[in-house]
Amino acid sequence: MNLFGLIASVLYFKSAQKLKKVPIISNFPPILIAGIAVILTLELLHIDFNTYNESAKYLKFLLIPSTIALGYPVYKNIELLKKNKRIIYSAFFLATIIAVVLTYTFARICHCNIDIIESMLPKSVTAPIAIEISKSLGGIPELTACVVVLTGVFGAMFGHKILKAVKVKSDVAIGLAIGAASHIIGTSKCVEIKNEKQVVMASVALVIVGILTAVVAPLFLFLIR
Amino acid sequence: MKKHLKEFFNLILGFIILLSFYFASYFIIKFMRISFPPAILGLILFAISLLSGIIKEKWIKSVCNLLIDNMAMFLVPLFCGLIVYKSIIVKNWIAIFTVIFVTTTVIIIAVGLFTEWGIKFLRLNKIKELEREKR
């Protein structure tokens, strides 16, 4: 069997993780570096995508159990959800509704096709959930994956700076905003600056906003048609 | 050696549990004829079973941590699937980038300020209540 795709993906990703110490590159998450490296390899060596995907699809399959595994951080931090619950739950709803409505409106203004809009609607949600939502809406999962990663990269690079500029200081608010807007990639930034409270809040936010988007996005599309 | 073997079996057991949640939700959705992503229903059911104690934390702890830590790696093949859709992105790149920048910035600011002010407001209320009780 041809294991090229599997080995290349894992190898590139693991080496991208090792690049953390290089200045400029360390701003970009490993997924972006590894993804671009694989694409360049395929293009430069004229390898067909199907040859790559033959074994790489097994890696993709692991996204399903990882999505379900996200239930674990919710279970572990359930106490946090009980504290200040009214504010926190309203913030989750606010984030979901802004994300869906604003993405739709802006994409419409930019004259995007409906399948592109459907792929972009779940863009603030962690990738495995976003892909599932995109599939059920009729979008293009590959485009969703790209948009989700770019959103995450943007949030991870500028999230803390934006929040500092508008003078948000509490860790609960910062974690919630980052997790709700830029999912797991933004959360990894909170891990990097070693702020436990932000990490916990962000990881709960990304799961709950993901679940809410799975309900709100199809409902919104249904209402607007 | 024995410890490693135990850890390995624990991982397999956890993985089987996670997959069985996926299949259970897949059949529930098929049976009820609704359109909802099965993996997300699986996630909800999984969290509920953990909270109610049907599933013990120690069975799934190691597999969950392993999967969540490496989640970004599983995305690489999907990200590369973009090659097939290259023309769509090239055609719409301005729209895609504007949507990402604007919506992400707005969400971060709105949610951040809302939560910050909300918590402050609640705290002030609590302090006022306590003062009233003191009187």
Image (cartoon, coloured by chain):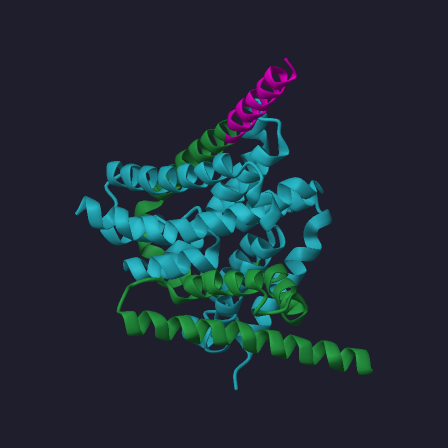
Q: Is residue B36 above or below residue B22?
A: above
Colour green maps to chain = B
Q: Residue A86 in the image: state x and y as whole percent.
A: 48, 36
Q: Residue A42 in the image: state x and y as whole percent.
A: 48, 66
Q: Is residue A178 left or right of residue A24?
A: left
Q: Is residue A133 above or below residue B22?
A: above
The residue lying toward the viewer, choosing from A141 and A16, is: A141
Q: Which residue is painted at 75% across and 82% down in the image? A: B5
Q: Is residue B13 above or below residue A76?
A: below
Instruction: Specify the farthest residue to the right.
Output: B1
The residue lying toward the viewer, choosing from A24 and A104, is: A104
Q: Residue A25 in the image: state x and y as whole percent.
A: 64, 46
Identify the image quadrant of residue B17.
bottom right
Colour cyan maps to chain = A
Q: Which residue is painted at 56% across and 54% down in the image? A: A74
Q: Which residue is painted at 41% across and 55% down in the image? A: A130
Q: Residue A202 in the image: state x and y as whole percent.
A: 57, 44
Say if the magenta span includes residue B121.
Answer: yes
Q: Is residue A27 left or right of residue A99?
A: right
**Residue B76 visible in image:** no
Residue range (magenta): B115-135
Identify the image quadrant of residue A196.
top right
**Residue A120 visible in image:** yes
Instruction: Specify the farthest residue to the bottom.
Output: A1
